[in-house]
Each structure stands twice: as C-alpha cells, then as structure tokens.
Amino acid sequence: MIRVSPSAEADMKGISCGLSQFNQNAGSKWLAGIREVFSLLEQHPDVGEVRAEFSIQDCRSFTFGRYVIFFRRLNDGIEIARVIHGSRDLRNI
C-alpha cells in the first residue's frame, strides 16, 4: 500500500500546476511519472538515501528528476511524506 501524506499531496498539486503553466500536458505527465516511482519504492522500500539527519524514524529520500521524494517504510507498504524541489533548503521544510 502506498500512503501519501496531505503535505505530499499538496506538494504534488503545486508542482503539477506549476508545470502545467508552461505546457498543458507537462503536469499530468509528471504526476504519472512520479506515481510510477512510488510503485517502485513500494516494491523496493530500502532504496534511496537514509536521512538520519531528520527526526523521522526510517526516513529515506529518492530523487525523481529535480525533485526529492521523502518516504518511509511501513508494515504494509510505504508512506510518502513530502515531494520537494531539490534546490530548496530541505532542512528548513
């Protein structure tokens, strides 16, 4: 099971809307791509970089294009916590 936090849903909506301003299909194409990555992470929840510097147990990150997906393994799948542009100050989000 893939759980997407409300914060991650808001992140994805903002990114998709921003991309769609430049190209109407870009936002939906990006959403489809990131959903494929979520499925990959669900199948292989130990991939990505361990992010011990954050105070979230078992926090990992995985890069998708210019964006960083923060997630953690759950007993029955994964939880997507945030999806953030890699140029942002990740420690202050």
Image: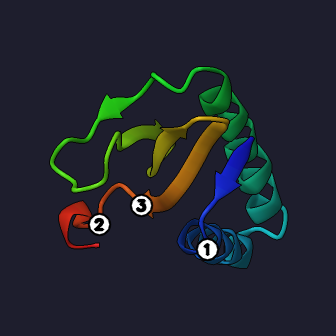
Nearer to the camera, 65 or 93 = 93
Instruction: Verify CB contact (< 8 Å) between mark 1 and mark 3.
Output: no
Q: Is 10 left or right of 72, judged from the image as shown? A: right
Q: Is 87 left or right of 71, judged from the image as shown? A: left
Callout 2 secondary element? loop
Q: Is residue 64 visible?
A: no
Instruction: Verify CB contact (< 8 Å) between mark 3 and mark 2.
Output: yes
Q: Residues within 10 Å of mark 2 (few under 14, many from 20)?
A: few
Single out the mark in the foreground, 1 or 3. 1
Q: Position of residue 17 (x, y in %)?
A: 69, 77
Q: Which mark is residue 84?
A: none
Q: Is 56 left or right of 43, judged from the image as shown? A: left
Q: Amino acid at mark 1?
A: Pro
- Dividing the picture into quadrants, the one containing residue 10 is bottom right
Q: Position of residue 45 (x, y in %)?
A: 53, 27
84, above or below 92, in the image? above
Mark 2 vs mark 1, CA separation in Å: 19 Å
Q: How many marks?
A: 3
Mark 1 vs mark 3, CA separation in Å: 17 Å
Name the residue at 57% across, 66% down. Answer: 8
Lower position in the chain sequence, tag 2 or tag 1: 1
Which residue position is annotated with label 3?
85
Q: Is 25 left or right of 27, judged from the image as shown? A: right
Nearer to the camera, 66 or 9 = 9
Q: Which mark is residue 88?
A: 2
Q: Residues within 10 Å of mark 3 (few under 14, many from 20)?
A: some
Q: Residues within 10 Å of mark 1 (few under 14, many from 20)?
A: few
Q: Position of residue 1 (x, y in %)?
A: 75, 40
Which residue position is annotated with label 1?
6
Mark 3 vs mark 2, CA separation in Å: 6 Å
Instruction: Verify CB contact (< 8 Å) between mark 2 and mark 1.
Output: no
Q: Position of residue 58 (x, y in %)?
A: 35, 39
